[in-house]
Amino acid sequence: MKTIIYARVSSREQEDTGYSLDAQEKLLKEYSKKKGLNEIKTFKITESASGRQIRKTFNEMLQYADKNKVDIILCEKIDRLTRNLKDAAVISDWIQEDEKHEVHFVKENFIVNKNTRAHENLVWDMKVAIARFYTNNLSEEVRKGQKEKIAQGWLPTKPPLGYKTVGEKGHKIHVIEQPTASYVQKAFEYYGSSNNSITAVTEKLYEDGLRTRAGGKVARSRIEVMLKEPFYYGAMRWNDQVYSGRHEPLITKELFDKVQNLLTRKKVPHYKSHSFMFRKLLTCGECEGTITGEIQKGIIYYHCNHYRKCSQKAYAPEKVVEEQIMGVFKFFESITEKEAEQIKSKIRQNHAQEIEYKEKALDGLNNRYKALQKRLDVLYNDRLDERISLNMWEIKNKEIVGEQEEIQNQIKKMKTEEAKYFEIWLNILDLARRAREIYEKRSPEEKRLLLNYIFSNLTLKDKKVIYSLTKPVEVLAKRVQEKLDAEKSFELKKTFVKQRRNKDLVGVSTALLHGQDSNLQPID
């Protein structure tokens, strides 16, 4: 009689402890030979197969049996064939179709067919139920382990590109994996610059050396998924919720948020023939919609695209927009070498004070975090000993973990700013003083990069540009303003008074801090 062999292992441990596919196949073939059966095909399911693949193979087996008039299915045990009532019902229907149809469970010495007696059918139903209970219980234990892993600050699954898993079973953590981690950082930097689409980022990463295992280009869709992954700034997304992680982040939360804002912007204009200098940099000052660039009679104009309700109808020439932001460059380039060194010296002095303050603040945050962790450990033990209900545990656990996440975010932000802004403060002054020179000699794309360093936001309303400075430039502007206002500080005010005889730079600097240039009027 025609026979099918069905073998399955559910975990690596089963394979290592004698339940391998080869061992099952050998047992079933010996049984088949002993019974004089004619096995014509073997179906195998490995421990790495997904639930979808298991179901697919199961259905393929039954379809093959119907097509080739197979009468007998050989399986090691009931839980190798099915662990749910749905599949058990499908098998029962197959058995009832023909009196010749049988399923042999070799290790249990149990055969099910259409003529199986009532008490044997009861055994079949009970063993299916037990197998189903085993699966449900295993699933429950897995979820419990996943919750505990998350509570400890670690992702209970494989990490995304740029990380690898290390450690022994039960103590595995995720660490940064180079060089792929550097490509992830570049992806966020490329897209966060507002100069590149996802397709352009994909191309740039390929040029930089990022490859798939087969040596090809990483798919655009995968890059898009990467850019939406909160794991890279130190969080973990699990079952549509975001938790704080203990792994080392690759990027800052600020950069991640900026990228998400760019990804979710509606109706961003697409430029095919021209690369406009202010594309994706300007927003409407009334409706906050996208400002579109277009060419009329050889002149580039910017205007609101009116995807939202808006009364702005004026078209601002690119030259007008450009001239209005030049006030920022004029302000910084007026600083002399001596004055620049004095400002740097002041930054270093303030930085030393900030370090002392931040160290005390970090100690306080770390102590608070440790206290919360002790409370969390006590709470977990109370739950294990059933001194509190599951509902109460979940409520209190959520409260404590939420506060821990906030503390970790504060710690990360302080450490990131500590390393980032001190260096930028010392370097941005040199960049700002040469901004006009750099700007005038660069291509439109390079100009856009410079504008991203200087401005955090640019809006256009009634042909007038209103802007916000990036954090380091804003801090620098405040430092310069302090110099301007100090009567006896490095003789800086005296120098600026001479320079302001024809133009009031104090007014310019004050306007900088408020996001506008009081001395520059829009040109019709």
Image: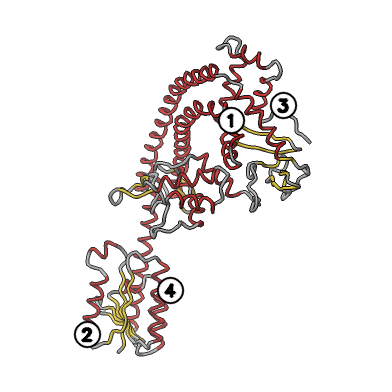
Residue beneath the point at 59% across and 30% down: 437
- The image's mark for residue 86 is 4
Task: Assign the C terminus to one quadrant of the image.
Answer: top right
Instruction: Look at mark 2 in the image and give the residue it sits on.
Output: 33
Inspect the image, locate mark 3, and give the three-letter code of the amino acid beneath it. Ser
**Nearest-to-viewer mark from 3 and 2:** 3
Write down the residue under mark 3: 518
Q: Is residue 455 above or below residue 106?
A: above
Disc nearest the viewer among 1 and 3: 1
- Label 1: which residue? 435
Q: Earlier in the sequence, mark 2 or mark 4?
A: 2
Q: Which residue is nearer to you in this view: 172 or 211?
A: 211
Which element carries disc 2, helix, strand or loop?
helix
Report how far apart the C-alphas of labels 1 and 2 lie in the structure.
85 Å
C-alpha distance separating marks 2 and 4: 31 Å
Residue 180: horizontal and vertical position, in percent? 40, 48
Q: Position of residue 346 (x, y in %)?
A: 50, 18
Q: Quadrant of residue 431?
A: top right
Name the kind of residue labelled 2 in the image. Answer: Lys
Q: Earlier in the sequence, mark 1 or mark 2?
A: 2
Q: Secondary structure beneath disc 3?
A: loop
Callout 4 amino acid? Lys
> Residue 286 location in percent, x, y?
73, 41
Q: Earlier in the sequence, mark 1 or mark 4?
A: 4
Q: What amino acid is found at the position of numbered circle 1 in the picture?
A: Ala
